[in-house]
Amino acid sequence: MAVIGFREILPRTFSHKFGESPSGEIKYAVTVDAPTPTQTIISAIGIFHGAPHPEFGYLRMLDAQVTETDRHHAEVTYKYEVPQQEDLDPNPLARPDVWSFSTGGAQVPALVYYHGTGNANKKPLQNTAFDFFEGLTTLEAEVRASISGNRADFPLADATAVTNSVNDATYLGGAKHTWLCAGISGQQATEVVNDTELRYWQITVELVYRRSGHNLLLPNVGWNFLEGGQKKRAWVLDPESNEKVASGAPVALEANGNIKAAGQEPDILERRVYPEAAFSSYFGTPPF
C-alpha cells in the first residue's frame, strides 16, 4: 500500500464574498498501488494543517478530505481559510489562550447617589430624616473576561485556590479587589493532528470586574452603640417628652462605635469577604 504518484487538478478555486473572509480550494489526484490509509496519502503530498496557500499566504489549510474514486485512485481536497486565531500550532497544548470580553449589569445595594451635576459628588442615599432605604438596589456595570485555553490536565488545585477570589494587586487596569474569579470549567477533548491522537482539557476561566470592587460596602449604622466601652441601645429624643427613647431605625455611628451627631452623614465601611490571589500569575494578560 503506497502512493505511486500525484498531481494537482486545475483549476484552483478562490472565493471572497463582501464582508466575509476569503477561502480557497485545491485538489490533487493520487494514484496508489492498492487501497492506502488516508494519512499516508496526505503525507505523500506534504500539505498539512496550517500550511499557507501557495498564492495567498494569509489563507491556511484547515480542512483536508480524501475520497477514494476506485481501487487505485483517490482525490484529495484541501480547503484554505483565514484562521480565527494567529497561532496554528498542531499541538493544542502549545496554542495560546484566547480572550473574550462582554459587559452587562449586576444588582448591588443602593447606598449612594450622585448629587448635582457630574459624577464627582456622591452622597449617602437617605431620606430627609437621614434614614437609609432598606432593600433598595441598583445596577452596576460589569465587565466579564472569558479565558479559553488547553491544558494537559484539569487544574483542580488552581481552580480550588482561585475560584471566588479577588485580585491582590492592579490587574487589567482595575484596582485591587475589583476583579473576581467566578469559576473555572473544563471538558475533555481529542484531536488527531498529522495522524497523532492528542487528548487534553479545554479550560474556560470567567473573571468579573466591578469598578466599586467586590468588597462589601456597609453603612456604619446600628441599633446599638458603644459608650465607655459598654454597648447600649441606640436612642432618639421623643419630640413630646424630650426624653431618650429606643430608636425606631438604625443610627449613624462614629468609628469608635459612638453615636454621630444628628444630621451627620454615616460612613460607608468596606469589608473584604473573598480571599486574595495573584491573578497575573494564574491567568496572565490578554495579547493586546
Image (tube, grey):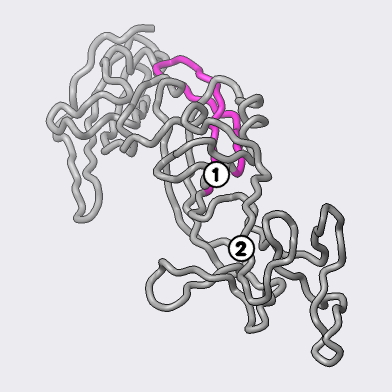
Single out the residue that lies furthest toward the bottom.
240
**Picture residue at 87% right of the left edge, 63% below the top:** 232
Residue, disc 1: 177
Image quadrant holding the N terminus, namely top left
Question: Is residue 196 highlighted in magenta?
Answer: yes
Image quadrant holding the C terminus, namely top left
Question: Is residue 185 highlighted in magenta?
Answer: yes
Residue 128 picture location, percent across and down: 63, 84
Q: Nearer the viewer, residue 146 or 106?
A: 106
Which badge, 1 or 2, comes first in the chain's sequence?
A: 2
* Residue type for callout 1: His
**Picture residue at 66% right of the left edge, 73% below the top:** 136
**Picture residue at 52% right of the left edge, 47% below the top:** 178
Q: Nearer the viewer, residue 146 or 58?
A: 146
Q: Which residues are magenta?
A: 182-208
Residue 250 picture location, percent across and down: 77, 70
* Distance from Cα at disc 1 to Cα at disc 2: 16 Å
Query: Dots 1 and 2: beta carbons under 8 Å?
Result: no
On the picture, is 190 further left or further right than 274?
A: left
* Residue type for callout 2: Val
SS class of the residue under badge 2?
strand
Residue, disc 2: 108
- Eyeballing the image, is 57 above or below 7? below
SS class of the residue under badge 1?
loop
Q: Alpha-carbon neighbours of circle 1 within 10 Å: few (<14), some, or many (≥20)?
A: many
Residue 162 picture location, percent across and down: 61, 33
**Picture residue at 51% right of the left edge, 42% below the top:** 176
Q: Nearer the viewer, residue 106 or 151?
A: 106
Q: Nearer the viewer, residue 118 or 146?
A: 118
